[in-house]
Amino acid sequence: MRFRVRPVARLAGRVEVPGDKSVSHRAALLGALAEGITEVHGYLEADDCLRTLAAVQALGCEVTRKGPGHYRIAGAGPGGPQEPGDVIDCGNSGTTARLLTGVLAGQPFVTVLTGDESLRRRPMGRVTEPLARMGATFVGRANGTKLPLAVRGRRPLAALAYASPVASAQVKSAILLAGLGADGPVSVTEPAPSRDHSERMLRLFGARVGTRGLTVTLTPGGLRGTTVQVPGDISSAAFLLVAGAIVPDARVTVARAGVNPTRTGLLDVLAAMGARVDAPPAAGEPGGEPMADLTIATSELHGAAAGGPLIPRLIDEVPVLAVAACRARGVTTIADAGELRVKESDRIAALARELGRMGVRVAERPDGLAIEGPQALRGARVASGGDHRMAMALAVAGLVADGETVVEDTACVATSFPQFVATINALAGVEAIRVEEG
């Protein structure tokens, strides 16, 4: 599948984006471990999150779809999951694989996880190493650090105080999920704050979770089924917000977007670049997650620097931030983002290569990149490499390029934002992006 993208003169309208991917994954997994019924509203019905629901069902939990994005999960309780009868396929979802590994570490049976070609290349060692310290056993490729991976869990697991070498919500979450069945408190200390969706949702389900500085501590105990309202995904909204900033005549509102402070780094950088962003105070926190309507209009952007503690707050938004940098006056630098090299693709190399095909000069660095603008983008044939965020970022670039842009390998967009093309076309009022098979 490919996108054929035409430049547009304007974008206007009010839209919603699909449910937050990170929150959706966690709602399904915690619902499975809780006693009683969990109702999830706004669940992201995209490939990655549907993989997590399928995994929950493979562990013996009853999942009922009651309507679009509305799921009823009958929890098995902490000791209730059953040994699956087959291998669990996580598809392209690193979040499914890593968080599920934490859940399985605390279950007294063997489970085998696999994924697609891309996921089988991604590192699992940063999760399996601390979980092995707690008593779980892992057998797999690259000495138990890559899928396919067999997990032999144990209950109870040993308590752990872990100093993580990286700020990673997936590592932290896997350890906390495993800690629900540990024989004592489990803590994770990070070098910088990472997403706190797990902490918020664990509290919503009744877990005892405390935070002091950069350390999160969970005291083992049971969970109670609850109701979860999933906000709109800020990572999906990012593509629309950047498009709204760089298309010539644009004013775009994304309604009910999640504005968890650990996820809003892109808003901070866009504001530093001079973008006209209206982000009112969050309207309540249903399900523990704040939401707000975000509005952006065409802006004269200038270069800015993103690095250090800001990076974990915008790591998934870097591809589209790089597109904004192409249209900004001066130099934009992104540093301390080496994690991008082990995402669905090596996003640092891919951005330099594919934006280069569109005529943009990008300085590739080991842990980031630098772009001096403004630079004119020209239509070209580019490729996502099977990476959904690269595919959408390149499509946004095509909206302001000179001539037609063809983005190859775009079926991957279904993993997070299946309505992306329809949403862009609705804002443009024309067929800005055409989907072609082949």
Image (cartoon, rainbow, N blue to C red):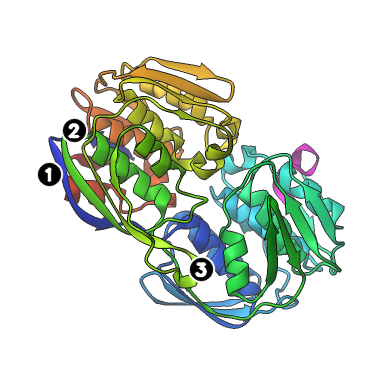
Which label sits on residue 136? none
Q: Is residue 293 left or right of residue 172?
A: left
Label 1 belongs to which residue?
430
Rendered residue at 44%/51% (across/down): 415
Q: Are marks 2 and 1 in contact (CB under 8 Å)?
A: yes
Q: Residues within 10 Å of mark 1 (few under 14, many from 20)?
A: few
Identify residue type, mark 3: Gly
| Sooner in the amino-acid sequence: mark 2 or mark 1 | 2
Q: Secondary structure at mark 3?
A: helix
Q: Is residue 87 visible?
A: no
Up-down: is 255 above or below 273? below
Q: Is residue 142 left or right of residue 320?
A: right
The residue closer to the viewer here, 20 or 408, is 20
Up-down: is 346 above or below 171? above
Quarter of the image where the N terminus is located: top left
142 magenta-colored:
yes
Question: Residue most toward the bottom?
Answer: 36
Q: Is residue 298 visible?
A: yes
Q: Which one is closest to the eye, mark 3 or mark 2? A: 3
Label 3 belongs to which residue?
288
Spot occupied by residue 117 in the image (x, y as percentages of width and height): 57, 40
Q: Which one is closest to the eye, mark 1 or mark 3? A: 3
Rendered residue at 36%/37% (across/down): 270
Q: Are marks 3 and 2 in contact (CB under 8 Å)?
A: no
The residue closer to the viewer here, 344 or 306, is 306
Spot occupied by residue 13 in the image (x, y as percentages of width and height): 17, 52
Spot occupied by residue 12 in the image (x, y as percentages of width and height): 16, 48
Give the magenta part as a residue range.
141-149
Identify residue type, mark 2: Arg
Label 2 belongs to which residue?
6
Identify residue type, mark 1: Val
Rendered residue at 54%/19% (across/down): 365
